[in-house]
Amino acid sequence: MKTKRLTKLGAVLSAALVLFSGILSVSAASVPQAVIDTDRKASVSLYKYDFTSAYADGVLGDNTYISTGYADENVENALMPYAIEGVVFSYAKIADLAVHAETKDGEHQNMLLYKLPGGDKTTALMNCLDLTSEDAYKTDRGDLYFTSDTLIDALSNHLNTAESQTKNALEAFIRQNGTSMPETDGTGHTSAAELEQGLYLFVETQVPETVSNTTAPFLLSLPMTSIDGMNWNYDVTVYPKNERTAPTLEKTLRESKADTGKNDGTDSITDGYAHTATGSIGDVIEYQILSTLPSITSRATSFSEYTYTDTLSAGLSYRKNDVRMEWFSDKSCTEESRVAVWTEQDGKFAVSYSALGDESVMRIKMTDAGLEELNNSDAVYDPNTSLYCGYSGCTMRITYTASVSATPVYGDIGNPNEVTLTWSRTNTAYSDTLTDDCHFYVYGLDLLKLFSDNLGDYSKVQFKLYNTTDSYWVTANSDDNGNYLVSGHAESEDDASVLTPGSSGHLFLKGLEDDIYRVTEINTDANYTLLGNFITVEIRAKESGKLCATCGKSGLTAEAFENGNAKDMNDDNGSASAIVPIRVMNTRGYRLPKTGDAGTTLLAAGGMTLAVLSAAAVALLLVFKKKDKFDD
């Protein structure tokens, strides 16, 4: 805050000194030099440079050069790379130069005054500076004569206490009463020639997209006294400064899941979003766009456009009518710092959709009502005291959702989702863009069914898949030849999809996120044994270290584990780490005998045994009878 205040004060003082330099002592000048040539026209040249960047790069310092009112080739050469094109200054002559002679306290004295003619124009200017006729040094037939001290103090005090409001007032005055100079060119230069001598007000009225703080309005006496106090300078060169800033832009995403946490208002509502995310087909993906608005310090720096063009990769589709825009007073984006919430129904922004090949495009454009609030709301800053206006420096958060509804790209290449921000300020011929993106990743499973004797019937085999991480059964659509695309989630096993390999024995299931799954064989060919237990498959995503060319952040790669054992993943159409391969082998089962075969043999064997046992019993009985007979 201290640095900003000093910068602001320096701008005010420099503006005041331009006028002050016009009344410096000329006692050392020769007579021809000291007397103004009243028939000579004057001119002004302005050069606009990005002082913010020049300071940051060390090219410019507080004492690098002294403003003299004359062109400085060294300054222009050094600051040429920082030239700002597209700035418009406007000017108005507000007073004539008048030498006033009077006798005061018995002494005769002469002094330079500035004569403001009576009329609506002078009244409007005095209202901007809170001046009245009582502040004039003298009045004469409706004309008001002011000293430079009074005019300097009035402008400086207003810029110090209410810079933004003073700028707005003087910008309005100059648009009504002034003349616009040509836009600054590629060298940052503009000029006005053949000017009548007098006191002029210069105000920066239009700026390109990156200028966030205009030069403080300044008064310039034409001609002005040279810095050495010995000449009159009829062709004045000024190097006013600008502060330049640009918006920020970040796009992130997350898989939509129930938020069971509690927020006391101090936690960021942006938590859980990241540059990369994985998901399944059928998931809802939540997207977030964050942009911190640059400074707005007056009407001249207000925004005329703020538009987002958002693009989704093939396989993802917008869930329409759910775009929401929130404003926060700082980058923390907590409940406590929320300033405003806009929905599509509020009319502050308009949303439109289109197609670009296989991709989907959404355009979010600020309406006139939205721009008015963005530029001029007093919800954040006190309009009577603050330099800043509207939502200057606030963070805009846009959220929307999309469905993963078709076949995306699988594996490391991922699915980029890009957003471009386009913005303009008051000079609508100049705009700039920022681009950021985030990446969505999806994976697949290649289950190869094998029979030990290669004679099994694949059409008899069935599997089900359960996501143990998020507790749901997988549903999928099929082309009837073993190719499946995840379609959604089911809470009950009864609603889970039954998956069957194709004629090649492969079961391809695409559209899985990085979670842990249980693959269970629920049916097989009757001549073979079921697997008897589920297979645990884990897909684990991690940063790849390969940086995105758009945002400079790392993408993702994946690794797979089967029953806890690491295994290599297959590529898919050139995209690595895309598909998890697993193998399921069924061996032949033990065959039961046919009805009548094993039973008849067993019965015959049982009959023979019974006959033998019967014969033995008869023999024993005869022996015992014969013994009894002998005993008798």
Image: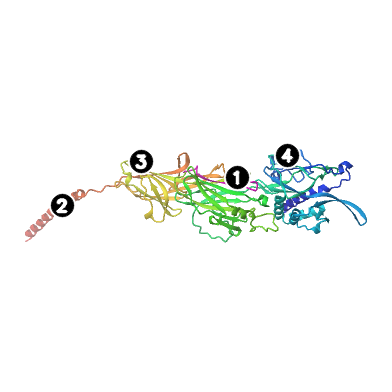
Residue designated by label 1: 433
**Type of the residue with mark 3:** Ser
> For the view shown, which residue lies furthest in the right direction?
106
Q: Report the Cα–Cα distance between label 2 and label 3.
A: 52 Å
Q: Nearer the viewer, mark 1 or mark 4?
A: 1
Q: Report the Cα–Cα distance between label 1 and label 4.
A: 27 Å
Residue designated by label 2: 607
User: Residue 60, relative to residue 619: is it above or below?
Assistant: above
Could you tell which of marks 1 and 2 lies nearer the N-terminus?
A: 1
Extent of the magenta region: 409-428
Q: Nearer the viewer, mark 2 or mark 3?
A: 3
**Type of the residue with mark 1:** Thr
Element class at badge 2:
helix
Residue 418 sits inside the magenta stretch: yes
The numbered mark at residue 504 is 3
Residue designated by label 4: 78
**Type of the residue with mark 2:** Gly
User: Residue 480, relative to residue 632: is it above or below?
Assistant: above
Crowd around label 3: few <14 · some 14–19 · many ≥20 (10 Å) = few
Q: Report the Cα–Cα distance between label 1 and label 2.
A: 99 Å
Q: For the point 60% across and 52% down, which residue is it?
A: 368
Crowd around label 4: few <14 · some 14–19 · many ≥20 (10 Å) = few
Query: Where's the C terminus, which quadrant?
Result: bottom left
